[in-house]
Amino acid sequence: MADKKDEKTKGSTTLEDLRRRINAVNHDLLALLNQRAEIVQEVREYKERNAIEIFIPTREQEMLDGLVEANPGPFSDDMIRHLFREIFRASLHHMETDKKQSLRVARKPGAPTDVIKVGNREVGREPIIIAGPCAVEDEDQMERVAGRLAELGVTFLRGGAFKPRTSPYSFQGLGEEGLRLLEAAGKRHGLKTVTEVVDTRTVDLVAKHADMLQIGSRNQLNYELLKAVATTGKPILLKRNFAATLDELIRSAEYIVAGGNENVILCERGIRTFARETRNTLDITAIPLLRDLCRLPVIVDISHAAGRRDILPALARASLAAGANGIMVEVHPNPGLARSDAQQQLDLNQFEQLLGGLTPDLLDLRPPAAQQSAE
Ligand code: PEP
Ligand code: MN
């Protein structure tokens, strides 16, 4: 029955013939569209080589005008403009996607997360914990924190020696003396140290004392500093600027990798939103997205995201559940007396409780003895 209907003819042409012709035209169009995308790609590469502006709107207008002028119908001129604008947009989109995938830090389909070695520790396998005070203040403070962290099986100690503060009158850190205190506490207790570098002039000094260099949120977009830390070869903890897109963060990481240093760890630390209950808003979405887009490990600084201590255990669990490769948290023996970020630092017992809430499925914190034998 259906066959009979299909075989109804107009003149001598059958419906099957017409369908075959439509299919052939579809396939020609498909080949032409892909051919066009390849030529657009070549144009882009040519323009990049010769430092010519990539997108020139007048060129698009010229092409549309030419097409409308040559349009014999039956499509209306408006429909031709609409169809070709879509084709132009698709070519541009393809070009941009292709470009993103060509970044060195991009995750290739199916590729594993990089494992970044910090001495004999590895970031990118089991989740890590980085803990310690906001700022290095004195030897006793560092000894109390480092001793307790080591007992709890934590392996990374943080502490700022150069503090980027909103007010020039706030405590700016102990500088070189702070670096020495951090290094000594780390060595006494077998902890790897992490501290922020804020200035190209002190990169070598910080690299001499610390196992991992931190680029803080304010400096994620400081490209000269990114280039400078790349030359140290040290592992770099790159924090997201509070107003940066994920693409901007990834391109900042690309600066370090392009500078010859593959050892980069990304850190989500909260972004600025309209919320007033927290200092920043922890962008949980950044964790799976960055892990998907980028081959580098991603950790989360829950302390600067929250700006308060009461919700830190929940944020730690949420971050690990979302796939973070670790957590950074500020811990101080006496937060009430801290010279910076007093309101968000955990005391040693609160920190122990936070760790206790990280169930084995979230975190493989092996006892120190087991960790040492595995190393
Ligand atoms: C810090 O970790 O000490 C710090 C200043 O954090 P951020 O750069 O994320 O504000
Ligand atoms: Mn702080």
Image (cartoon, rainbow, N blue to C red):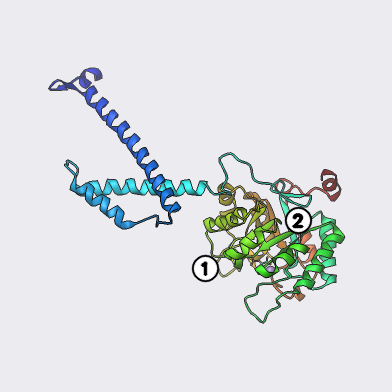
Q: Mark 2 points at which residue?
A: 355
User: Front-most of 273 and 249?
Assistant: 249
As drawn, the residue found furthest toward the bottom would be: 169
Which percent across, then down, holds residue 46?
41, 49
Q: Distance between the residues labelled 1 and 2?
A: 30 Å
Q: Can residue 271 be seen in this view?
A: yes
Ligand 1 closer than 8 Å to the CB at disc 1?
no
Which percent across, then down, holds residue 60?
30, 53
Residue 274 numbered tag: 1
Residue drawn at x 78%, y 52% is 119
Q: Identify the image quadrant of the N terminus.
A: top left
Label 1 or label 2, whichever comes before in sequence order? 1
Residue 131, picture quadrant: bottom right
Amino acid type at circle 2 is Leu
As drawn, the residue found furthest toward the left would be: 11
Which percent across, then down, holds residue 177?
79, 72
- Quarter of the rendered image showing ligand 2: bottom right
* Count of residue discs: 2
Mark 2: secondary structure? helix
